[in-house]
Amino acid sequence: MADIFDVIADGTRRDILQLLRERGSNGAGGTSVSHIVAELGVSQPTVSKHLKVLREAELVSVREEGQHRFYSLSAAPLDEVDDWLVPFLEDGSPLADDGASSLPDSAAHAAELVGRAAASAKHAWESALKKLPGR
């Protein structure tokens, strides 16, 4: 299996994951390849290539209906990213400071990515807690 950091390093794959996350939170039963192509404005072969990488990393699941395939986000593999990021978010870390406005552009971008990952982790924890018996 590919290193999760290599998989999410590609901007198009991150865009696909973001689209699937947004569509999944709206209760969509999966997103078709043609919808991904239309939303992202990239070619079908390009989307298919990236979806293959995401499938192999188990970041997406696919449901087939006839000749159509519908993709959904499987966020569990992102736990490795969350585990790596958590120490950077603890008290005393430069990323934990409220001085984001004084950060250089590259650091501000990194802080934005960390924030998105933290939101994803929060969502994953909430989803996992809802699945526990007695909840």
Image: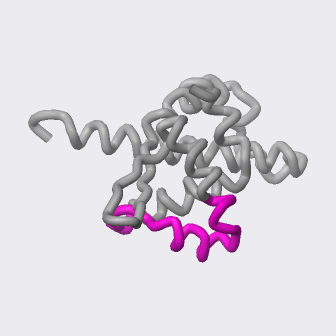
Name the residue at the bottom extreme.
38
* Residue lying at 64% horizontally and 58% vertically, measured from the top left: 15
Give percent across and percent down for residue 43: 69, 68
- Residue 95 pos. (x, y %): 72, 36
Name the colour scheme.
one colour
Q: Going by the image, does 102 lie left or right of 37?
A: right
Name the side, left or right, on which 82 lies relative to 72.
right
Left or right side of 70 for 80? right
Q: Residue furthest right?
A: 104
Locate residue 8, reporting x and y percent: 65, 42
Q: Is residue 62 above or below residue 53?
A: below
Residue placed furthest toward the left = 134
Q: Looking at the image, which is closer to me, 40 or 45? A: 45
Q: Quadrant of the N terminus?
A: top right
- Viewer can see residue 57: yes
75 shown above or below 24: above
Specify start and end residues of the magenta stretch as a single range.
25-47
Q: Please tell me how many numbered marks the rendered image carries.
A: 0
Is 123 covered by the magenta stretch? no
| Residue 87 in the image, given as x and y percentages of width and height | 62, 23
Confirm whether residue 91 shows in the render: no
Residues 94 and 88: in front is 88
Q: Quadrant of residue 135?
A: top left
Name the residue located 90 percent from the left edge and 47 percent from the top edge.
104
Q: Is residue 90 above or below residue 42?
A: above
Q: Residue at x 67, y 33 (%)?
A: 5
Q: What residue appears at the point 31 percent right and 44 percent down from the top-left corner?
A: 127
- Confirm whether the magenta stretch covers residue 38: yes
Name which quarter of the figure residue 107 lies in: top right
